[in-house]
Image (tube, rainbow, N blue to C red):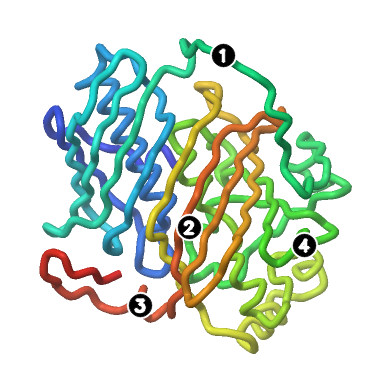
Amino acid sequence: MKLAAVTAVHQIDPHTYSADFHDAWTIGNVPHGGYVTACFQQVVRKHFDTTLRKQNQPHTITLHLDFLRRTQIGPATFTVKDVKLGRQTSVIHITLRQDDREEVVGYITNSNLDTETGVSYPSGWAINPAPPSTDVSKLDSDTDRLWGERKAWPFADFRKATQRIRSWFPRAGQHSPAIVDQWLCMRDPGDRFTNDNLGFVADVFPQIIESFLLGGLDSYSVEFEKNNSAEEQKARMAKHSARMWYPTLLLNLDVKKALPAEGVKFLFSRVQAKAIKNGRYDLEVIIKDAEGDLVALSHHVCLAVSAERNLAARWKVDIGETKL
């Protein structure tokens, strides 16, 4: 099922929307954070296409989400408040509720990337250290000299959402345990990345902590998959550490470029952690397209907790009390 279909939203009234979170896009029992973010983006798109149509601001340029409580499979309701309507940018606030729980809240700024004007200067910035060069036309056939496809990620049965993409990693390995470079596309051959699902792209990547957690085992290397059978891979994973859950506390997205309306097949992402301490860590995500243009930047604050926190039964909490 294509990402656009599973993130589709229905307008209930000018400021209320509904969605249905699908089981195939989960981490354990919890809908994948990037998938939920893409649903937020669909709400924003629908709101600016209908209620705020006169603003002519179809593009999200900034998004900030706070994940207050874990979400669940099934119906979800989004309530939108128009905070500031302007000529160049407009800001809305969205609240996601399930079973009368306020679970995710966000502020989103929209503009029109096609009509933006103003000063522009080259910054000279580049990703450092630089990733290997890529012949994107050879990714699909897995014949690029420096990049190889990783057919399946560790613990894919627990992280079902990761099965929805294909990914390529540097054949020579990553620069460091705290950096992951990847090219990715959707597993459905007809699916494409657009500005309306960049939130999913910004949150689907190998878990950096597992580079340390698995005793130095490069569990996301192409060579590991090549040199170990499926049974051997499972045995080696089980030998090291049980599954963990890495819930997002907040996610920021800063969009730099409007992708074609029909979407693009491949995108590149660099994911890097700067500090991992006391079960809390940061992630910086850089997203570029096949032309090498900067598409978006993202920043996350995450926790590293036992998978039992994900799988445990829900229980009611009082307003103001936080339970993941």
Label of residue 309 in the image: 3
SS assignment at label 2? helix
Q: CA distance from mark 1 to mark 3?
A: 48 Å
Nearest to N terminus: mark 1 or mark 3: 1
Q: Secondary structure at mark 1?
A: loop
- Categorize mark 3 by other alpha carbons within 10 Å: few (<14), some (14-19), many (20+): some
Residue shown at 50%/11% (left/top)?
117
Q: Which mark is residue 161?
A: 2
Label 2 neighbour load within 10 Å: few <14, some 14-19, many 20+: many
Q: Which residue is mark 4?
A: 222
Side of 152 relative to 304 (left or right) = right
Q: Where's residue 311, x and y in %?
A: 35, 76
Foreground mark, 3 or 2, reads: 3
Mark number, residue 89: none
Query: Looking at the image, is 294 positioned above or below residue 214?
Result: above
Residue sitting nearer the eye, 180 or 161: 180
The amino acid type found where label 2 is placed reads Ala
Seen at 40% across and 55% down, the residue is 33
